[in-house]
Amino acid sequence: MAGDFRQIEWDAETIEDCRQIIRLAIREDLEREHDWTTVALVPAERIGAADIVAREAGIVAGAPALALAIEEFGATISLDLAVADGQAVAAGTRVATIRGSVRDLLTAERTLLNLLGRLMGIATLTRTCVDAVAGTGCRVYDTRKTTPGWRRLEKYAVRCGGGHNHRTGLYDAVLIKDNHLAQFGGPDRSPDTAAAAVRQARDFLRDFPGESTGKPQIIEVEVDSLEQLAAVLPERPDIVLLDNMSTPQLTEAASIRDREASGVELEASGGVNLETIGKIAATGVDRVSVGALTHSAKCLDVALDYASNG
């Protein structure tokens, strides 16, 4: 296996991104004012409890975000989590119970559900894709096609679903794509253009001054033909991205790689959906990247069921 990209965990960076999103959500809902409906109808001293429930089956992701949201609201609420991230749950499963000020419960409700529903939706779609490639040895990766500001959280949800994270940002790796090659080799570029670009990138990284700059270690290059693949393999990039190739082309690409450069990993991208991903994975590629994991995942239906007054 080639060196891999950084995999997102529930760490200090992810937590800080989550806090920023929650703060914006609070401003969107309250604009430094109040939940006037709740203030009008609920006595300030009323205490109660509510269950957060998954209305449909799915994979849990973002459970730790609930505590952060309660904290950022400054809510007088206690949280009892009944599940853990990465856990599969059936429809009707209690995800958590929150107890405390009813005014705070109702004010924070939508933010809590939006966070959980979005992340659980991504994790659930990811698990479906991971299950579809089971037994092939191929790994499912996300992309940078994420909601602005949500990237670490969405990539964390992919991990909860059993997927892998592609590069987090442009700083993470050298990924030479078609538009890089277009400017590098001009409109009449030959199959050798990709090989020349890999050589230049490797020379740049080798000669780049300073060892503490956090320079990337992975070089990946995108090709869209078998001729390009054959030309670039002698340069031994870490990963070759096979863009929008048919399954017969992918099978032939894997055969060429096995003969010429067995240590180079192949990543299939483009035209990937639940109908095609299993066939793509069976061609012998090592990775399949799926933008839909983050840009097209449906929010999982989660709801707040008011349980009782204290």
Image (cartoon, rainbow, N blue to C red):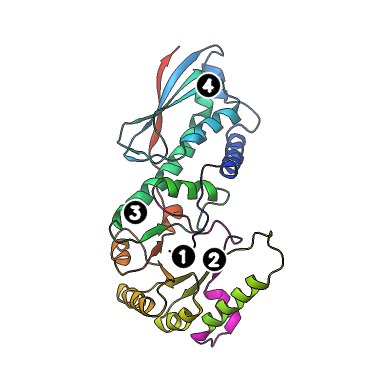
- Residue with the mark numbered 3: 130
- Looking at the image, tell me whether mark 2 or mark 1 is earlier in sequence order: 1
Residue 102 horizontal/vertical position (percent): 50, 18
Badge 3 amino acid? Val
- Residue assigned mark 4: 77
Q: Is residue 245 left or right of residue 79?
A: left
- Tell me: 240 left or right of 280: right
Q: Residues within 10 Å of mark 4 (few under 14, many from 20)?
A: many
Residue receiving disc 1:
2
Camera-side mark, 4 or 3: 3
Tell me the SS state at disc 2.
loop
The residue beneath circle 2 is 218
Q: Earlier in the sequence, mark 4 or mark 2?
A: 4
Count of numbered labels shown in the rendering: 4
Per the image, label 1 sits on a secondary structure element best described as: loop
Mark before the other along the chain sequence, 1 or 4: 1
Q: Position of residue 115 (x, y in %)?
A: 49, 39
Gap between marks 4 and 3 measured at Cα: 36 Å
Q: Residues within 10 Å of mark 1 (few under 14, many from 20)?
A: few
Please name the residue shown 37% across and 74% down the image. Answer: 245
- Label 4 residue SS: strand
- Are circles 4 and 3 on residues that touch, CB within 8 Å? no
Q: Quadrant of residue 57?
A: top left
Q: Which residues are magenta?
A: 163-192
Numbered disc in front, either 4 or 2 = 2
